[in-house]
Image (tube, grey):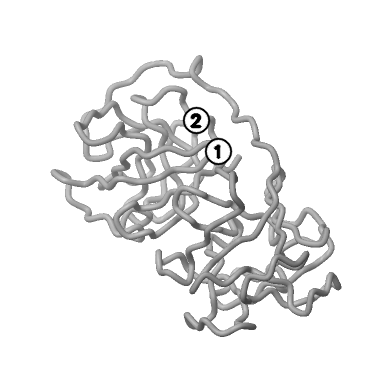
Amino acid sequence: MRKAAHTPVRRDASADLETVSPLPATTGAIKGLAGKCLDAAGGSPEDGTPVQIYECNGTAAQQWTIGTDGTVKVMNKCLDVTDDSDADGAKVQLWTCTGGDNQQWAVNAATHDIVNPQANKCLDVTDHHTADGTRAQIWSCAGTPNQKWAAVPGASPHTSDTCWATHYGPEPSGALTANGQVFDNNADTAATSLSRHPQLPFGTRVLVTNVANGKSLVVRINDRGTYAWTSEEPKCLDLTDSGFSRLGGHLDPDDGHIVVHEQILD
């Protein structure tokens, strides 16, 4: 399809497709606002136990395991978004692991984000409060200190790098992406740049974080983009105009790029 504020160059990139191997699970404390630790209230492993911040004490209630399956566990229970909600302010709790999307988390050690991809929301300390017992919740990713977490030592994303992303710009009505879908400039989708090696497979989800402001967004790859080069960083993604704007980018065809961290989720 592709135009994206740069002259497109086509080639067959199918030979470049590859999958990403998961990293080993890691266990330890997750520190957030004011140096407080993510904590299971009262040290209880029961379903429905509130998850909060609390002074770090090294107890089992603060020893979180970041798994290769997208879960974050403590005392063998999963970090869970209450009632499968995707709303700002939905509280998080412990619950028996079910494999549900409300128990899936993208932990990015480079940008210090913990994101629930289903909701496309960040793990957040309610109202920026630093008191022991303040509940954890999900909220639209804003790059603020109450959404930043020093995750388990040694934990790192499946694949993460720093690169730059641009945006599509205006597209004709009915334009199709490279995988045959009707293009939607308001969707959380993206094109994998033809200047990158390897190409990302269609359907891959990527957590994209604007380095300048910490804002994050989960996008799904459904297109192939353009060749483009810059002296700053290699280009990796073409974002929709909506996604680019929500990350804080300016829709300027002459300077329409932002430097991002990208984390491949699956």
Which quadrant holds residue 44?
bottom right
Residue 263 picture location, percent across and down: 50, 43
Point out which mark residue 204 bears: 1
Other residues around mark 2 within 10 Å, as few (<14) / some (14–19) / many (≥20): many
Image disc number at residue 60: none
Q: Residues within 10 Å of mark 1 (few under 14, many from 20)?
A: some
Amino acid identity at mark 1 = Thr
Give the residue number, with chain letter if any, for mark 2: 200
> What's the amino acid at mark 2?
Leu
Please tell me whether mark 2 sits on a helix, a strand or a loop. loop
Q: Are marks 2 and 1 in contact (CB under 8 Å)?
A: yes
Point out residue 173 in the picture as x, y percentages from the top left corner. Answer: 34, 46
Secondary structure under tag 1 reads loop
- In this picture, residue 263 sits left or right of residue 244: right
Residue 171 visible to the viewer: no
**Image quadrant in which you'd find residue 246:** bottom left
Q: Is residue 190 above or below residue 105?
A: above
